[in-house]
Image (cartoon, rainbow, N blue to C red):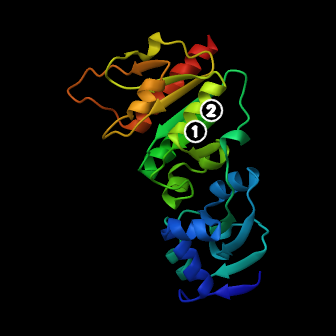
Amino acid sequence: METILSSAQNPRIKNLLLLQQKSSERRKQGLFVVEGRRELQHCVEAGYEIDTLFLCPELLEGASYTAAHVFEVTPDIYEKIVYRGTTEGVVAIIRSRQMTLENLQLSENPLLMVLERVEKPGNLGAILRSADAAKADAVIVCDPLTDLYNPNLIRSSIGAIFTVPTVACTSEECIRFLQGHGIQILTAQLQDSHLYYDTDMRKGTAIVMGTEATGLTNQWREAATAHIRIPMLGRLDSLNVSVSAAILLYEAVRQRAE
């Protein structure tokens, strides 16, 4: 361990906070921040490279890590650089890498979750957890309004951003990719749609969802193989998008298990 950092004015601490707070800095530096032993483990297992480690020995409980740069931080500084205090004493700066549609390794009958213009990191994080649990081949985020290395997304996904191949691209690129691979496009929408459990999801399937506020754009509705809906029996017309995604993913799991 190189140095004990005890001041919030230390340049390395200031840069760490900057990376947490600003997506522009994450893009510029090609770096992002991961806190927590579980999240960091998933990150490393996915092949990401640790650039810098900040360790708080009082909380670390025997874990060991290696990186190009390792610094010890005092408990006071650790409290300032983490979003939650239950992350077992480790924060890391990680080197970014870009996953593309061409990098995806699809199964014989792939199951994909596609999200158009997702805005809330917490929703995307929850959907990634469901995609991991359902063993989806990938999550594709089209025209995203949040970057994939947002700390809130990493935290809410509990590391699923590293366990599920996740790609950001345009809707046009995604539609061409799906059609080129013969993957049916099922768009979740209330209008002109069939009940989701009456739709065959055993073949290659992409489940496509839009925002809670405006739904999907016309290009996705027109590209769809079929339109599907979850029945709404109450007075409200919408479930949270992450809940809807979990329902649809697990219908595919159910059908494929028969």
| Residue nearer the viewer, 150 or 75 | 150
Q: Is residue 58 left or right of residue 143?
A: right
Q: Is residue 4 left or right of residue 187?
A: right
| Residue nearer the viewer, 46 or 133 | 46
Which dot marks residue 68?
Answer: none
Above or below: residue 35 compared with residue 54: above
Above or below: residue 248 compared with residue 105: above
Measured as percent of width and height from the top left, residue 143 is found at 48, 46
| Residue corresponding to mark 1 | 173
Which dot marks residue 177?
Answer: 2
The kind of residue on which mark 1 rests is Glu
At a point 34% along the width and 39% down the height, the residue shown is 212
Q: Name the quadrant of the N terminus.
A: bottom right
Measured as percent of width and height from the top left, residue 180 is found at 65, 26
At a point 68% along the width and 86% down the height, the residue shown is 4
Label 2 with label 1: CB-CB less than 8 Å: yes
Does residue 129 appear in this view? no
Above or below: residue 113 compared with residue 228: below
> Tag 2, which secondary structure?
helix
Does residue 9 appear in this view? yes
The kind of residue on which mark 2 rests is Phe
